Amino acid sequence: MPRIRIEQDGPVKTVTLTRADKRNALDMQMLEELLACFVSTPAAADRVVVVRAEGPVFCAGMDLAERARLGPSSGASPIEPVLHAMEAYPLPFVAVVQGDAIAGGNEIALHCDFVVAANTARFGMSLAQIGLAPTWPLAKKLMDVAGPVATREILMLGDALPAERFLDLGLISRVTPPESLDAEANAIVQRLAANAPLSLRAIKALLNRQADFREHIAHDDVDALVDAARNSADAREGMAARLQKRAPEFTGS
């Protein structure tokens, strides 16, 4: 069964996460479907992409049950190709966040050019709470949009923060009551669709290139630390505890 739904309405393409029964957790199938969508060349008439989700949760992050079954891993996170494709995609993205956007869900939202959230939604990166750490590109995005102080709060504490807090930090564009969410997002979508398409493509490319410099900093030693955390006993304990809805018992090993 497909994990996403793609709809076209004139110049607007809408990509909807449809795994509501699993809180739209990102399994490998969903990542493959998202990647196939975002590496494709948009039609000349396309102007904007909307990313949204079914159910009460926007996206709970990576599917921890699948991750536990797959076992140890190293190198790039499986979500990275999707996020790179979103950054390279020539059209602007608008995320419509009706519920919690956590870890990978938070990253998908922040890789959109505009984020419109319900005031009941929360955002966060809970990796430290389950024994994991973000890879270089995931931390880079937070540094780009949040700066070092807010990034420390988001990554080191790992708590989910209310949408209003993310708005105050300048990470998202709009916060609105749930009943006004679609109207608020649609106003931005229609404004983007009315702008000059070549200008929008040029502006997106320009802004992405401005933020590229951190990609070229040597970070092999940092990657090794991230891999060590990812494959640690603490990570196995943290993911098991999250799935079992209990507090983890970390040992630093």
Image (cartoon, rainbow, N blue to C red):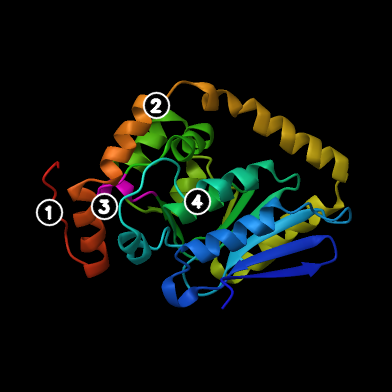
Q: Amino acid at mark 2?
A: Asp
- As helix, strand or loop, the secondary structure at mark 1 comes to loop
Identify the residue position indicated by label 3 in the image.
130
Closer mark to the observer between disc 4 and disc 1: 4
Q: Nearer the viewer, mark 1 or mark 2?
A: 2
Quadrant where the C terminus is found in the figure: top left
Among the two numbered marks 4 and 1 on one chain, the one whose residue lies closer to the N terminus: 4
Instruction: Report how far apart the C-alphas of labels 2 and 3 lie in the structure.
Output: 23 Å
- Tag 1 or tag 3, which sits nearer the N-term? 3
Q: Is residue 181 visible to the viewer in this orientation of the structure?
A: yes
Which residue does the numbered mark 2 point to in the structure image? 220
Label 4 SS: loop
Three-letter residue code for mark 4: Ile
Marks 2 and 3: CB-CB under 8 Å? no
From the image, tell me which residue sits under label 4.
Answer: 79
Disc 4 and disc 3 in contact, CB within 8 angstroms:
no
Question: Where in the figure is residue 163, as x and y percent of width and height?
Answer: 47, 54
Q: Viewer-proximal residue, 187 or 135? A: 135
